[in-house]
Image (spheres, helix red, strand yellow):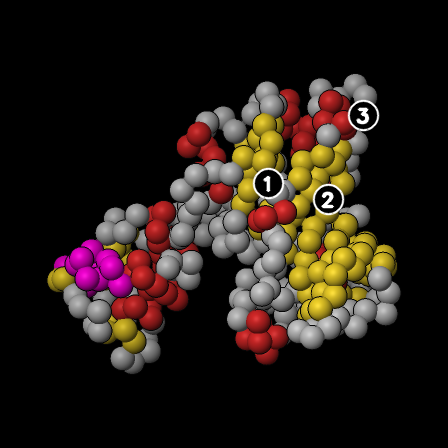
Amino acid sequence: MRTIYIKSKRKNETVISYLKSIFPNMITSTLYKALRNKDIRLNNVKINIDCCVKYNDKLDIYISDIYLFNLPKNLTTIYEDDNILAVYKPQGILSNIEKFDEENMKRIGGLEPTLETIVCKVNSNYKICHRLDRNTAGVVIFSKNEIAYLEMLKAFKEGYIHKEYIAYVANSNFEKEHDILEKYILKQKDSFSKIYDKKVANSKKIITEYYVLQKNIDDDFAILKVIIHTGKTHQIRAQLANISHPIIGDPKYGKNEINKKFKIYKQLLFAVKYSFSFYKDSPLSYLNNISISLDENLYNNMIR
């Protein structure tokens, strides 16, 4: 059960509208069912579907986090050995909580479950080694022991891991089927990353390579394989938008009219393949002989 206090001051806002705004991944039918079953109470009173809320009302929500946040009921394991576990992270779920956010806790009535908390229910000793954006799906690697954790952290930091993504982008009119983009990125105060042609104060160099895998001229989109040679926040999303090929569904760097056209509101970006180049004396050097790849069924045919 979660208890939240209404912070919206909008007039005549229904409980359905408000709950969908703070639990956007929840399936609407789940919300209607909970209201029919009287699993949501307003100021300790059972309510109907058409009930409205007002500022500082109290809502008690008797819905499991699995349904509130639309969490996977079972982990999809991509790869596993004695040292690491690689699992699939769906869109909409945080990889982990990087910093304590008291305001968000108040808004949703507690901590938000993450991929890390789900995995740690399997084994509390497992540690997440990197992260993907909330609405980026794909492979996330966890360590099973401290040695593997430190080795993986070093590998991600120093570039021993080759990372490939699949991106569905707007506009099929590519001048080049393959290109390596070299720019500079600067994270703004609002968590928006801006791209510059030349270095500015506090900016970081970014290198993003892409290959056009498929073009759809009729619907005017393309599918890219993207390789990042640096790893900065929102690098792919910002840099593709900078060349007028925003990722479809991206609410931050994309365009509303494009997202509405395709009826997609979470970026179609997938971390699909990791390969490794550890030093020979690394305890994880055996991974140099393999690649960890996402099943194509998890990212193919996203636009129909």
Which residue is denoted by mark 2 in the rendering? 163
Q: Residue at x 84, y 62 (%)?
A: 177
The spot of residue 277 in percent (x, y) is: 79, 31
Badge 1 density bin: few <14, some 14–19, many ≥20, Cα 10 Å: many
Q: Residue at x 60, y 31 (%)?
A: 79
> Which numbered dot is residue 140?
1
Describe the element under mark 1 as helix, strand or loop: strand
Q: What residue is drawn where x is 58% and y is 36%?
A: 78
Q: CA distance from mark 1 to mark 3?
A: 22 Å
The answer to whether the residues at label 2 and label 3 have Cβ atoms under 8 Å apart is no
Q: Is residue 91 magenta?
A: no
- Looking at the picture, tell me which residue is in the foreground, 244 or 55: 244
Residue 250 screen position, x and y as percent: 60, 65
SS label for mark 2: strand
Q: Determine the residue positioned at 66% across, 64% down.
A: 247
- Left or right of residue 297: residue 292: right
Q: Amino acid at mark 1?
A: Val
Report the magenta residues as a range: 32-44
Q: From the viewer's perspective, is 87 left or right of 7?
A: right
**Residue 275, percent from left and from top:** 74, 36
Q: Return the residue at label 3.
A: 279
The residue most toward the left is 45
